[in-house]
Amino acid sequence: MPKRVDGLIRAFGMSGLQIVEDLASIEEAYAIDLQSLQGASKSRKSSQYDQFEAELRLEAARMSEFYEVFYCLENSIRKLVKEIMIEAEGANWWHSNRVDENKIRNIANVRRRKEIDSGITPRSDNLIDYTTFGELSQLITDNWDIFDTVFSSKTAVSNITNQLNLLRGPIAHCNPTDELEQERLNLAVRSWFKLMS
């Protein structure tokens, strides 16, 4: 193939790649689907939500990052609590005197029963999955004798989980947060992991 033709083919291919990249940037910036990447599947079904204004969809996408942080944090705390409780009390730890019957165990049972009675699939067979962020904090501080080797300060656990719980509210209830609150969230999450000895 002559060099000139080969160069034109390469230039055509590179131009095509640049156009695709530019279209993808426009799609992202304006929350529209130009179908520039035919056959490419989106991880989210945003096309089913075209009735919502683009600004709202962009805000939701931005806020989803903070939901993911709380999802990971809350579930990692549940896992940690469960592992330490099993180590201390055995597999039947949930029914031990380490779990306050009135403040935690009964409430978790009520939440699970409500899901069953509503006809929706229960989220879990493990009742710890029905505890709130605040109740997880209470499980840790009420059982400090077995958590003191994991965390450096009981007071700090209470303070940081209280702050995280306050920051969690707007995110859990689908309200946007500003940049300052996002920085506070990042700092609180870092502080949580720093607490671990």
Image: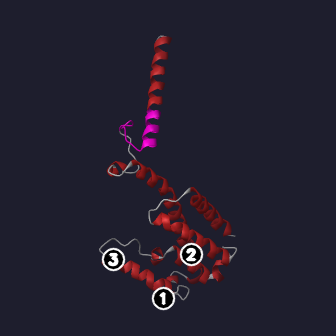
Q: CA separation, marks 2 and 1? A: 19 Å
Residue assigned mark 3: 116
> Residue 114 placed where, x, y %?
35, 79
Q: CA separation, marks 2 and 3? A: 25 Å
Residue assigned mark 2: 81
Is residue 28 one of those drawn in magenta? yes
> Residue 35 placed where, x, y %?
36, 38
* Residue at horizontal 44 percent and vertical 50 percent from the top: 58
Magenta residues?
20-38
> Residue 197 placed where, x, y %?
69, 70
* Residue at horizontal 47 percent and vertical 34 percent from the top: 21
Dot 1 alpha-carbon crowd within 10 angstroms: few under 14, some 14 to 19, many 20 or more? few
Q: Residue furthest left?
A: 119
Is residue 39 one of those drawn in magenta? no
Quarter where residue 158 is shown = bottom right
* Residue at horizontal 57 percent and vertical 76 percent from the top: 137
Q: CA separation, marks 1 and 3? A: 21 Å
Residue 191 to residue 113: above or below = above
Mark 1 falls on what kind of element? Answer: helix
The type of residue carrying mark 2 is Val
Mark 2 falls on what kind of element? Answer: helix
CB under 8 Å between discs 2 and 3? no
The type of residue carrying mark 3 is Ile
Image position of 188 (left or right of 33):
right
The type of residue carrying mark 1 is Asn
Dot 3 alpha-carbon crowd within 10 angstroms: few under 14, some 14 to 19, many 20 or more? few
Mark identifier at residue 102? 1
